Image (cartoon, grey):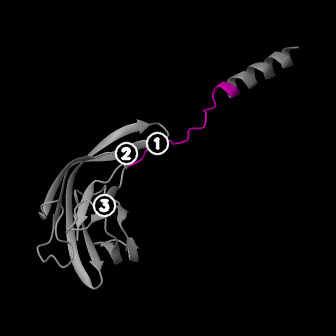
Amino acid sequence: MKNYYFFLMLFLILNSSCEKDDFCIEPVTPKMIIRFYNATNITQTKTVSDLSVNPEGYEEIYSNVSLDSIVIPLDVSSNQIIYNFSSENNQDILSINYEIEEVFVSRSCGFKAIFNNVTVTSDVSNDWILGLTETLENTITIPTIDNESSAHLQIFH
């Protein structure tokens, strides 16, 4: 009978020390969503032909695709990332600067980054990107990027 109680106690102790499995189902660090619009009809999206997107220092993300919107990651190890956008042999550079805020999500997910005071600047060559706002300005500030529920940036071409 002593062995029975011993094994019962041992089983209870071992069973109570197990942790439940945690799976991360919370949102992770958001990416920037970009929509492309027609510069002559600013309410209409416009597909970019032969689009290639290459972040400096990293592998190309998109190569020779035709899309009206894209999703690009921001660098969580730096406060800036530079993207080379090219379409039909025309190239423009977007410089993206931001402040990173780390937010604890949960034990299973850890931390995620939120990007605050995001400033996007297009180079002045205007090969095919005509502007980042409806008034075709080359600089825009986005207060925060904390989700992927809607587009963060509009590019007019």
Residue at left offset 35%, top offset 66%: 68
Dots 2, 1 in contact, CB < 8 A: yes
Residue 100, position as x, y percentages in the image = 25, 48
Q: Which residue is at the front of the view, 137 or 6?
A: 137
Taking the view exactly as shown, the residue that stands out farthest to the top is 1
Q: Which residue is mark 2?
A: 112
Between the C-alphas of marks 3 and 2, the distance is 21 Å
Disc assigned to residue 34: 3
Q: Which residue is mark 1?
A: 109
Element under label 1? Answer: loop
Element under label 2? Answer: strand
Q: Earlier in the sequence, mark 3 or mark 1?
A: 3
Q: How many neighbours does mark 3 have within 10 angstroms: few (below 14), some (14-19), or many (20 or more)?
A: some
Residue at left offset 69%, top offset 27%: 15
Between the C-alphas of marks 2 and 1, the distance is 8 Å
Element under label 3? Answer: strand
Q: How many neighbours does mark 2 have within 10 angstroms: few (below 14), some (14-19), or many (20 or more)?
A: many
Q: Nearer the viewer, mark 3 or mark 2?
A: 3
Q: Quadrant of the N terminus?
A: top right
Label 2 is placed on what type of residue?
Answer: Lys
- Magenta-highlighted stretch: main secondary structure? loop
Judge from the rendering whether residue 153 lies leftward or rightward of residue 14; answer left or right. left
Q: How many neighbours does mark 1 have within 10 angstroms: few (below 14), some (14-19), or many (20 or more)?
A: some
Dots 3, 2 in contact, CB < 8 A: no
Q: Earlier in the sequence, mark 3 or mark 2?
A: 3
Q: Which residue is at the front of the view, 23 or 32?
A: 32
Question: Is 20 contained in the magenta span?
Answer: yes
Q: Quadrant of the C terminus?
A: bottom left
The residue segment tinted magenta is 15-29
